Amino acid sequence: MSKSSDLLVEIGTEELPPTALRRLCTAFEESLGRLLKENHLAHAGSNGYATPRRLAVIIRDVPANQPDREVVRRGPAMTAAFDEDGNPTKPAEGFARSCGVSVAELDQLETDKGSFLARRSVAAGQPAVEIIPEIVKRALKGLPVPRRMRWGGGDAEFVRPVHWVLLLLGDQVVDADILGVSSGGTTRGHRFHCNEALKIRDPSEYIKTLEKPGHVLADMDRRRETIRTQVTEAGAALGGTTRIDADLLDEVTALVEWPVAITGAFDEHFLEVPAEVLVSSMQDHQKFFPVVDSNGALLPHFITVANIASSDPQQVQAGNERVIRPRLEDAVFFWNQDRKVSLESRAEKLAGVIFQQQLGSLADKQQRIARIATGIAEAAGFDTKQVQRAAALCKCDLLTSMVYEFPELQGIMGRYYARHDGEPIEIAAALDEQYQPRYAGDDLPSTATGQAIAIADRLDTLAGIFAIGKPPTGDKDPFGLRRAALGTLRIMIERRLDLDLRMLIDTAVQGLPDGPGNETVTNDVFAFMMDRLRGYYLDIDYDIDVFEAVLARQPDRPLDFDQRMAAVKAFRNLPESASLAATNKRIGNILRKANSKIPSGYASDLLKETAEQALASAVSDLDTAVSPMFKKRDYTNALCKLAALQAPVDRFFDDVMVMDEDAALRDNRLALLSSLSKLFLQVADISRLQN
């Protein structure tokens, strides 16, 4: 074997869960690379591969052996190793014996903590083939598998039963027992096109051999783009455009090894049903890609991706058309049946549906939403009657047959059924918009009514789940509270709603079954949402110290918080900002350490030094100038104005002794510095800004 070779690891399994495939592939590749480096086996990079039946990694230029390396074993300190006459002590002799040498053969080790006896030796590197099996086992054990399974009579556990293990270092098979399977030098091709063992003589042959004759595209990215190209061309051939959802594309990529796009059609009369229903049936339930015309209207066609190149594709097409037809017929039936009863008439049945055992029924939740949303409407100047009407209908579509069958259409069907019942456009839209944003980057509610209901719904859930003691822990968030918090904040900030968040949370808490007894819930929910707000600003490239500077002032209104953030970010770009941030930090330290009670204001007649008189004049003039700006929340211009304080405050600290022996002068100077600090604190604690 050469000094370095490529390492190939392939774990062949039964069909892996498609939604977890890419995550498993990435984790396996990263873990193998990290563990090799930890075991002193440097390499030149890696590539991960995955299909429904395999996880594989090729790691380039793995050395055949670990390098020899020096091992330094530290013993007792030199001061304890020898007595006054220079004779070795018992600790020194004991250390030497443990090393198998005499004291005279030991070395001296110099560290920043002193000198020590030490034994230096060289550890010979092990062959890579002896280390790799354990590395592979550790990497597999550490994969993010939520639930492992056993199979057969062994004790091995993995996400799916393992059928083969391919383990090559260059042209050498690395002998190992991995998950109860002996490693070898063969892989397997496509289950139908090439259901046989394929010999791999070197990792460089792996991808080519799998493709031909194996009929397997092992590279997920290449397979994904192949599918995208095929379904795009198929849609164009049908005279339309394929609607490609990224999540569906990823899932289909994880379901096939040899993708072949197949078109299909359904009867045009199904187009009478709302397009969202048909798309949901095709996309979410059948994994089909819909096709639309140049105006975005749905065409009576679909595209599926088969995992086989059939000799008779018409039969595959006919089979898929037979499968989709009953689903679409069900949708037509639900659509017609649901419209026979108004949304409003379903409201009374919400009392029989539990939202959460301790928080009551959906009827209870709907009433709480109405209470919170009314407060939002009054505060924001929205049409209160429209908001109350939308709140009274907001959960009614959950009792329709369509939403029962297609839960992902909640809100969307509410909008359609409300319009059928003759409800105003804004109220109908609000029934859909209450769930926006549904995911990261989704649109926000565009109507005032939708914004009020969306915020109220989320705040009720946040307050309720915190009140019953079930906030998110670690990566577990079964009620989607992190998403609810971020969605609420985004609506308030990006839709420019000047709402008092703490007050609205308290309103939500007071409406809970035991609301008056939940004194700490408001603070807990507010703190939780501020933590989400931190992530929001970091994602849009604000620095953490800017956020901490504003957070220190605890603004209750997210829109006001956002205006302060923009102001501090602009202030930080000024040449005076670093000096003023340091000065405010210094002032804060001085005021905290002052033993005397600081007066609420300074006395002009006690300003003796020219520098303190100049600073007082500047503080007074700027206070007058920026007060109107603060009232208008024009924080950016206010902070830019306050930047003029740099010169007089620097001169003050150069020329004036703050902690004067004269108590009256000292307290007056402290009061002056306090007045200066309060000017900045009307926006943020700029002392938290980093240079």
Image (spheres, rainbow, N blue to C red):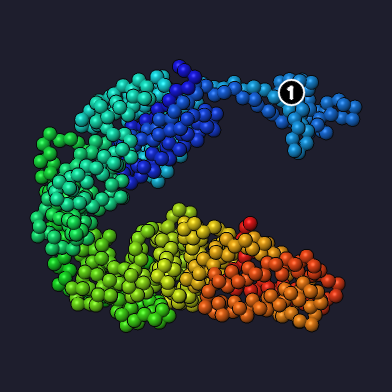
Q: Which of the two residues, 467 or 259, is positioned nearer the viewer here?
A: 259
Would residue 323 appear left or right of 199 to someone viewing this image? left
Q: Position of residue 345 (x, y in %)?
A: 22, 76
Q: Which residue is located at x 33 percent, y 35 percent?
A: 219
Q: Is residue 202 visible?
A: yes
Q: Secondary structure at mark 1?
A: helix
Would residue 90 appear left or right of 190 to someone viewing this image? right
Residue 292, quarter of picture: bottom left
Q: Position of residue 463 (x, y in %)?
A: 45, 69
Q: Which residue is located at x 78 percent, y 33 percent?
A: 115
Residue 332, quarter of picture: bottom left
Residue reaching furthest to the right: 85
Q: Which residue is located at x 34 percent, y 24 percent?
A: 205
Residue 641, quarter of picture: bottom right
Q: Give the quarter of the figure containing the N terminus.
A: top left
Q: Which of the two residues, 146 or 112, is positioned nearer the viewer here?
A: 112
Q: Give the quarter of the figure containing the C terminus.
A: bottom right
Would residue 491 appear left or right of 399 to someone viewing this image? right
Q: Classify 409 as above or below 120.
A: below
Residue reaching furthest to the top: 1
Q: Is residue 154 visible?
A: no
List the residue tagged with mark 1: 97
Q: Classify 320 as above or below 648.
A: above
Q: Which of the two residues, 328 or 179, is positioned nearer the viewer here?
A: 328
Indicate the amino acid at tag 1: Arg
Q: Position of residue 677 (x, y in %)?
A: 67, 71
Q: Residues within 10 Å of mark 1 (few under 14, many from 20)?
A: few
Q: Which residue is located at x 25 percent, y 50 percent?
A: 244
Q: Position of residue 88 (x, y in %)?
A: 83, 26
Would residue 106 appear left or right of 219 to someone viewing this image? right
